[in-house]
Image (spheres, rainbow, N blue to C red):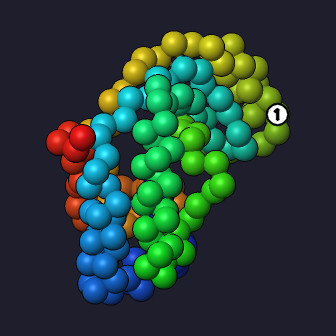
């Protein structure tokens, strides 16, 4: 949803105090938000990543991302943020052999799936994690979950 800090070379650079501060900031920013419904439709390929495109049913996703980003910035953090907070996608595959010949074959197959209906997902939980860029299992630690079920 939001990278709360810039990428670092190791999780060890984050002190317990820094993690507690980010947790507190995120808790405050998320507290008044309800669940977010996203319609997933279409599979795409950018670079070496295959992803599913999401379309939020309302502005809840954008507002949630904006609030978390602004709250982090107001507390001196430098979140990884982009001007347009509305897009959502889910990476499902990272290709390790990205030779142009193989990617072209894959691109032709994926182009046939651009309009495939996948379904609607209701996000009820946001998770605070420390991870690497590819969210590898060995480098991912879940720190806390925030519920979006009870806010109104």
Name the side, left or right, on which 31 lies relative to 98: left
Label 1 SS: helix
Which residue reaches farthest left?
Answer: 150
**Location of residue 10 in the rendering, given as x and y in whole percent from the top left corner:** 45, 79
Q: Residue at x 48, y 82 (%)?
A: 76
**Location of residue 132 in the rendering, given as x and y in whole percent from the top left corner:** 47, 64
Name the side, left or right, on which 58 lies relative to 108: left
The C terminus: image quadrant:
top left
| Residue 60 versus residue 58 in the image, above or below | below
Kindly indicate the quadrant of the structure image that contains residue 114.
top right
Q: Residue at x 38, y 29 (%)?
A: 37
Q: Residue at x 32, y 55 (%)?
A: 30
Name the side, left or right, on which 129 lies relative to 151: right
Residue placed under numbered mark 1 in the picture = 101
Whether residue 92 is visible here, answered yes or no, is no
**Location of residue 17 in the rendering, given as x and y in whole percent from the top left corner:** 28, 86
- In the image, 50 versus 99, the foreground residue is 50
| Residue 76 versus residue 66 in the image, above or below | below
**Location of residue 32 in the rendering, given as x and y in whole percent from the top left corner:** 28, 51
Q: Residues within 10 Å of mark 1 (few under 14, many from 20)?
A: few
Whether residue 146 is visible here, answered yes or no, is yes
- In the image, 28 versus 140, the foreground residue is 28
Name the side, left or right, on which 67 lies relative to 80: left
| Residue 67 versus residue 147 in the image, above or below | below
Kindly indicate the quadrant of the structure image that contains residue 18.
bottom left
């Amino acid at each position: 949803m939001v990278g709360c800090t810039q990428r670092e070379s190791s999780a060890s650079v984050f002190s317990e105090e820094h993690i507690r501060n980010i947790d507190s900031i995120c808790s405050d920013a998320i507290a008044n938000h309800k669940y977010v419904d996203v319609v997933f439709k279409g599979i795409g390929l950018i670079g070496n990543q295959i992803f599913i495109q999401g379309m939020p049913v309302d502005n809840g996703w954008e507002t949630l991302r904006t609030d978390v980003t602004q709250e982090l910035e107001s507390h001196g953090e430098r979140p990884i943020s982009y001007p347009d907070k509305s897009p959502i996608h889910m990476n499902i595959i990272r290709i390790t052999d990205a030779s142009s010949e193989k990617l072209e074959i894959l691109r032709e197959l994926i182009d046939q799936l651009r309009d495939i209906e996948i379904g609607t997902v209701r996000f009820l939980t946001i998770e605070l994690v420390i991870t690497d860029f590819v969210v590898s299992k060995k480098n991912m630690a879940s720190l806390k979950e925030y519920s979006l079920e009870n806010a109104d």
